[in-house]
Image (cartoon, helix red, strand yellow):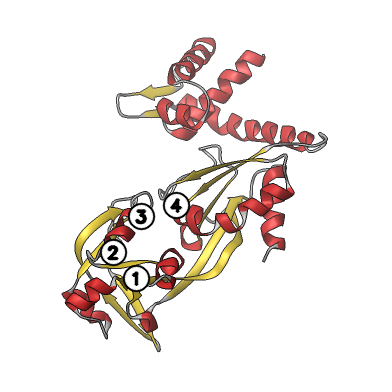
Amino acid sequence: MSNNLRDISMFVSVVRAGGFRDAARSGELSASTLSGAVRRLETQLGVRLLHRTTRSVTPTEAGLLLMTRLGPALDEIETALGVVEVFRENLPGTLRLNVPVSAARLVLPKILPGFMKKFPDIRVEIDAEDNIVDVLSLRNDAGIRHDDKLDQDMIAVPIGPRFQRNATAASQEYLDRYGRLSHPRDIEKHACILNRFANGALASPWEFERDGEVICVTPKNRLTVRAGGATDLAVNAALEGVGIIHLFEDWLEPYFENGRLEPVLADWWKPFSGLYLYYSGRRFVPPPLRAFIDYIKSSE
């Protein structure tokens, strides 16, 4: 029976992940192990559970029925085990978070050290990326994102500053050479440094606001970098006078303070809402995540 339950659990993970490789990446098993488990289950039941092609893995009618009936049951088992674990003394546990690179750079450094000092038995794993992912299928306890990117069945808890701004800046060398700007439309005449989101879309147009007037400007991309991992390259290019950059104010603030960058059109910077820690409202909240939620609430 225990072997059957293990194979069923692997089958469910493959269906939820949409394939053997993705399921293997989100767990601690190889794709071949997962494939073997599904084959054993198919042999035992005498029916095919998955349609396999070189590009995709999808459940058959029988597989979908099995998934529909057993998926929630496995979730209940996981929840029950989690409830029992609460009664262990000195529960260490692991908190797994999926966060954007900006949160790892600007928000968590102000929160995480204090949390880990208060809860020395809790281990923390941070997966920093700018892709919008299903945090549950990747075995994360929670994620951090802006509220416009959250699913409706997620519970959201404010984390970090409640408002942020994208700042526009350039080096003194660049502005001395090409002139200072007095209006957002002036950006169209300048070389700019752009970010490209993880989904391939450019972070453009740039949006500005003052006294209720909103202006969107499409900048000329002298340099384009992938948001997140290459952001430091973009900042360095701005420091070296390559062009004008448009980025989180907190990211650029140290360079404003030391004079290496000059704010550009600061009275036009538009505020937007801050980040949220989010997690499933349908699953048991593991103790490390509950401790983290309570900690950030008490730190507001």
Q: Which residue is tagged 1?
A: 261
Q: Is residue 150 visible?
A: no
What's the amino acid at mark 2? Ala
Q: Residue at x 69, y 61 (%)?
A: 297
Q: Earlier in the sequence, mark 4 or mark 1?
A: 4
Left or right: 8 with respect to 31? right
Is 246 situated left or right of 287 in this image? left
1 or 2: tag closer to the N-terminus: 2
Q: Earlier in the sequence, mark 4 or mark 3?
A: 4
Identify the residue at the far front of this view: 258
Label 4 or label 1, whichever lies nearer to me, is: 1
Q: How many marks?
A: 4
Residue that carries the numbered disc 4 in the rendered image:
101
Could you tell me which residue is drawn at 54 percent across and 59 percent down?
107
Please provide percent x and percent y for residue 182: 27, 86
Q: Secondary structure at mark 1?
A: loop
Callout 4 touching callout 2 (CB < 8 Å): no
Residue under pointer 2: 238
Q: Quadrant of residue 262?
A: bottom left
Query: Residue 19: horizontal and vertical position, in percent?
Result: 41, 29
In this picture, is 175 found above or below 278? Answer: below
If you read the primary sequence from the N terminus, does the residue marked by circle 2 or circle 3 appear first?
A: 3
Q: Are marks 1 and 2 in contact (CB under 8 Å)?
A: yes
For the point 53% across and 54% down, the residue is 144
* Relative to 257, residue 61 above or below: above
Give the CA distance from mark 1 to mark 3.
14 Å
Residue, disc 3:
232
Q: Classify 38 as above or below 161.
A: above
Res 66 seen here: yes
Identify the amino acid type marked 1: Leu
